[in-house]
Amino acid sequence: MTVERTVTIVPEAGLHARPASAFVQAVNDHEAEVSAGRPDDDLVQAASMIAITSLGVGQGDDIKLVADGSDAESVLDELERILTTPEAELDTDDG
Amino acid sequence: MAERTLHGTGATPRSGVGTVVWYGRDISLPDPDDVEVDPETERRRFADAVDTARAELESEREATAERVGEDEAAVFDAHIQFLEDPTIEDAVETMIADGGPAPNAVDAAFGEHIEQFEGMDGRMAERADDLRDVRDRLLRLLTDGERVGLGDLPAGSVVLAERLTPSDTAQLDPERVAGFATVTGGRTSHAAIFARSLALPAVVGIGTDLDTLEDGAEVVVDGDNGTLLVSPDDSERAAAANESGAAVVNDSVKTTDGRHVEVAANIGQPAELEPAAKRGADGVGLYRTEFLFLDRETPPSEDEQYEAIRQALDTFPDGRVVVRTLDIGGDKRIPYLDLPDEENPFLGERGIRRSLAPDSDLFATQLRALLRAAADGAGDLAIMFPLVATIEELDAALDALEAAAGLDDYDADAVDPEVGVMIETPSAAFMADELAARVDFLSIGTNDLTQYVMAADRENERVGDLHDPTHPGVLRAIQQTVTAAHAEDIWVGMCGEMAGDPDLTELLVGLGLDELSMSAVTIPEVKTAVSETSYSSASERGDRAQLAATRSEVHTTLDT
């Protein structure tokens, strides 16, 4: 199953530092293959911290997420939660 | 007067003078044209380095979260993600498949992204530092042993390092090294124990002040005072060079009133055997078998283990060699064994617990090797089980030994090794009477016993004051163990660092210990101290010490 979603980024730091870390962690915790990118650009591997950080997307930017796999919906739900939660309120799983 | 003095913890009561050589500071890559590269081996090395780096990062993360806070620890999560990044992994795999050595592939794969991030502005540039950090960590692991070898230093070198691991010290040639000093570590760190076993001058735990010293500087390593003198003057230099310890005593020793006390050496690797014999060791009181498992890709074969133990038995033809079965876990990690990460490794599956785990056949192999060596070697073998906490564990270990002895590839009649238990857990000390009824000897491992009785991490300098075996709580555990052993007419020894402190020899003889085993450096001092001690008056002193309520009362007893 392939699902697609576009999310506007809320954390002040953009997709960077802690939000990026939480984002990559969430991708790795799921089965689905996820790619991400600016809506009109090529997508990159979302499991790669380097690739995700290199997107350079900031607060207010849109990011397109494509997930393919059995838990595609749930991984996108989790990623959307991370991308729309202000950094200060972001809890890591093992915090 | 020296230009300046750096302070740390003295590891060995010895001084030495020499020229600074930094170890592990600059990473040099192999020249790909000069080395034969097997892609399968390189892939494995890369995977092992990633595993080890992950384990290091996870434990640093834990420590930071505890000491500083969750926010500061988060940087380690990012490092772990960079470490496991599929972009890097793919690039490294491709370069290895094309015939590149693993370190060069890692350097190139990270290099590309470091440049990319450096070209971006603000917070992005910080990521370049993170990547550099992860790259250097991997390169350090991958180039271990390939960088300017520790075995190949100019004579008179003083080695400086962040820390020295067992695989580092295994390469050090004690004939060429004048001493060493490290940024981290305490008295019972691996590096400090190693230094004592070879009588190498050493100061550990100096802190980042050490980083200010450059290669080529002249220093005096003063292990007595725990200092490093930079640019010493002639008199300081001469004082360090002329220092010598007590005279070597080769014969076995007795107290003035005729009580024999065995003085033996703790051995961590074969290179330490000869120096220990030269310093007058009666035998080996603790042979740590972990070294055989370090610095390699697979566990040692039965034959390799046989050879190593045989060598020890032949070095002490008239003595006894107490071999401790494998004690991995805790702070001793062996990547290829792929042991699970534990939240609290010192309270986890280490020592006999690991040996008895159903998924491990290492124990059976080791026991077979030991029995064969005992049949063929010159000296007497004794087998000791580490970290026993229950009678059930001892029974299971004895069953495993019996099963190994049932194999017919050696002459079972020719060998009947003594079997004993290392007393390291409070449970073992409380149960010493039951344990003593089932074995031939007990040996008290005071480093771990102190750590567990006092609940004080032996590597944590902040609780270093608690990690002291002269606290009455530890002395009573020792006394109880000795009494239990003697009630069963078996001998009891001590193989922790406490046994090697000549200032405590009278106390330990007085408490009734039959054997003291230590890093080789202080064997002459301890032998001299034993032969100057009267057992009857030491015994009174021992009685008073174990009735003391505080550590200072214990020390008063020692001084009067």
Image (cartoon, grey):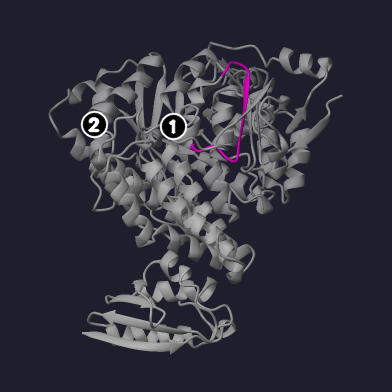
Q: Which residue is mark 1?
A: B145
Query: Given the current orientation, which residue lies at the most extreme front position?
Result: A40
Q: The magenta stretch spans which residues?
A: B154-165
Task: Name the amino acid type tagged 1.
Answer: Gly
B67 to the left or right of B383 = right
Expressed as whole percent of the image width and height from the top left, the position of residue B207 reads: 69, 44
Q: Which mark is residue B302?
A: 2
Q: Amino acid at mark 2?
A: Glu
B268 shown above or below B208: above
User: Which x, y percent locates residue B291?
Assistant: 40, 34
Q: Secondary structure at mark 1?
A: loop
Q: Secondary structure at mark 2?
A: helix
The front one of B86 and B447 is: B86
User: Relative to residue A8, is residue B483 depicted above or below?
Assistant: above
Instruction: Give the letter of the chain under mark 2.
Output: B
Q: Nearer the viewer, residue B180 or B25?
A: B25
Find out whether residue B126 is within the magenta segment.
no
Tell me if I can see residue B434 in this picture: no
In which quadrant is the N terminus of chain B drawn?
top right
